[in-house]
Amino acid sequence: TILLGGVVAVCLGIFIYFSLFNGNDDAVTYEFYGDYACVIDCEEDAEKVVIPSKVKRDGKSYTVKKIGEEAFESCKKLESVKIPDSVTEIEMCAFIYCESLKSIKIPKGVKTIELGTFSGCESLESVKIPNGVTKIGSSAFYECKNLKSIEMPASLTEIGDEAFMYCEKLTSIKIPKSVKKIAHEAFYACIGLTSAELLCGEVETEGATFRECINLKKIT
């Protein structure tokens, strides 16, 4: 059980798996289902990881479509991850506490940034969320203290509670008109935030969206 700023997430799993190495000799572990593979673990000391779009097991080729819960949890030395466009699902807490991760490109087929996906990635500086993503989940970028910019797509409809809580270096945000819901304390204590542009018209808010954003001077 992981507590993320009031959000409780159960990230547990029992797996039978087969271990492979990618081209950069970073140990990545996969679980296989039918015709696709899921990344479920990585060596804690890995610094750079390239996930291939396909892997082989017993002579059969599997498309890598998913990154599982907590797959890269606490890989504190991990600086970069290249995720192939074949990946369409990144499960909750997948990169939680990857303290050295500076940037990441999310594949265009991903529809949801799940709960706690990048929580505690304190070196993460910028994120471009691709068009097609409809939801940023609860605590998705919780305590990403060095996050300076976030680009939200026109497809986005919901921002979860505490999604950007304690993103202290975020200075401005532009929320697209497609957004229909901004949950409780989504931008709590983003103390570097000075302006927020809400292009959305009628939007459901659960209160305290910008609470403790002490330098926020302009909301349009």
Image (tube, rainbow, N blue to C red):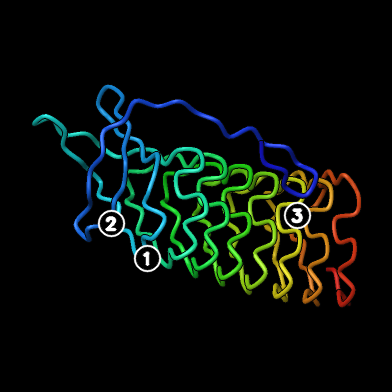
- In the depicted structure, whether residue 160 falls above or below residue 174: above
* Residue at position x 28%, y 31% in the image: 36
Q: From the viewer's perspective, is 212 left or right of 139?
A: right
- In the depicted structure, whether residue 219 falls above or below residue 10: below
**Label ID, residue 200:** 3
Using the rendered view, name the quadrant where residue 55 is placed: top left
Q: Which residue is mark 2?
A: 26
Q: Nearer the viewer, residue 175 or 7?
A: 7
The mark nearer the N terminus, 3 or 1, is 1
Q: Secondary structure at mark 1?
A: loop
- In the depicted structure, whether residue 41 falls above or below residue 168: above
Answer few, some or many: residues within 10 Å of disc 1's Cα (few below 14, many 20 plus, some between 14 and 19): some
The mark nearer the N terminus, 1 or 2, is 2
Q: Nearer the viewer, residue 185 or 47?
A: 47
Give residue 145's position: percent from left, percent from top.
Answer: 67, 69
Q: Nearer the viewer, residue 119 or 90?
A: 119
* Residue at position x 63%, y 42% in the image: 115
Answer few, some or many: residues within 10 Å of disc 3's Cα (few below 14, many 20 plus, some between 14 and 19): some
Distance between the Cα atoms at labels 1 and 2? 8 Å
**Label ID, residue 47:** 1
